[in-house]
Image (tube, grey):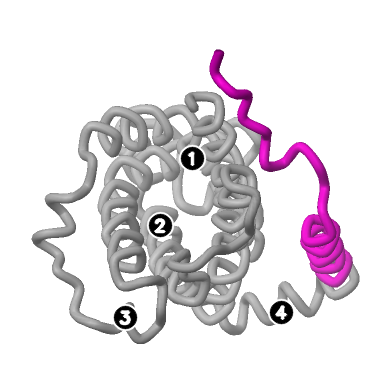
Amino acid sequence: MPLAVENPMKRMQTKDYIACGISFLFLVLLCVNLDAFITVTRAFPYSTSFLKFAVLATFGECIGLRIATGDYSRPGFGILPKALVWGFLGMGIKMAFTIFSAGAPAVPAEFGLPITAATLKSGDFFPRLLAAFCVSVTMNFIFAPVFMTLHKVTDLHIAETGGTLRGFFTPIPMGRLLKEIRWDVMWGFVFKKTLPGFWAPAHTITFMLPPYFQVVFAALLGVILGVILAVAGMKKS
């Protein structure tokens, strides 16, 4: 008779209350200092994108690890290298938001639809929704696969070098690590299912938001996806 495997999240522990408290404090500070948040985000879009993704997306990975294993971190996990990678990826995502927000709405316009880049900011609801959907689809199916592949390579490199900053700054063997990616999972699940099933609809909502909220919302989506993937992995186990 197989032994039952205890759910690592079955009982709340002190570390979980601390994590919840920090998350609640972050939301309170954001609400209290909303005007300052908007001002700083507008003045330093790429620096703030680095910080948002470094903190929130890394926190999402820690939550996923907690759900799957019972720990927020463990030897070799590499919180600092992951935060550094997410920070720079966050800057790339901000750049992609700017590029695709300006260019993608021109595609439906070429088919005669009354959609422009300005529609995302000032249009009626349904034209804005269509424009946001076009931006999300083009970004997710052109930019996201390259982004996700690069992220996977850096994850493999972090794991291979023991999760240390010193190890992370050693040369990345791109060719070998690209061969070590499980492309059946990358294509069959990450590209084929999460892009149309999660990221395209989710980022449609993202591009309906004011520009100064888009990056932080995208980083929060990374937290949500980390939880979803961890739970899905447990169910498969």
In the image, is residue 11 part of the stretch drawn in magenta?
A: yes
Q: Which residue is mark 4?
A: 39
In the image, is residue 108 part of the stretch drawn in magenta?
A: no
Which range of residues does the magenta coloring cover?
A: 1-30
x and y percentages locating residue 166 in the rendered image: 35, 86
Q: Earlier in the sequence, mark 1 or mark 4?
A: 4
**Viewer-nearest of labels 3 and 1?**
3
Whether pointer 4 and pointer 3 mark residues with C-beta atoms closer than 8 Å, the reply is no
SS for dot 2: helix
Quarter of the image where one finds residue 187: top left
**Amino acid beneath label 4:** Thr
Q: Earlier in the sequence, mark 3 or mark 1?
A: 1
Q: Which residue is mark 2?
A: 102
**Amino acid beneath label 2:** Ala
> In the picture shown, does residue 66 fall above or below 9?
below
Q: Is residue 8 visible?
A: yes
SS for dot 1: helix
Q: Which residue is mark 3?
A: 167
Mark 4 vs mark 3, CA separation in Å: 37 Å
Quarter of the image where one finds residue 60: bottom right
Mark 3 vs mark 1, CA separation in Å: 43 Å
**Viewer-nearest of labels 4 and 3?**
3
> In the picture shown, does residue 229 fall above or below 149?
above
> In the picture shown, does residue 4 fall above or below 115?
above
Name the residue at 50% across, 76% down: 80
Quadrant containing the N terminus in the rendered view: top right
x and y percentages locating residue 144 in the rendered image: 34, 49
**Viewer-nearest of labels 1 and 4?**
4
x and y percentages locating residue 206 in the rendered image: 58, 47
**Amino acid beneath label 1:** Ala
Name the residue at 44% across, 58% down: 97
Q: Earlier in the sequence, mark 3 or mark 2?
A: 2
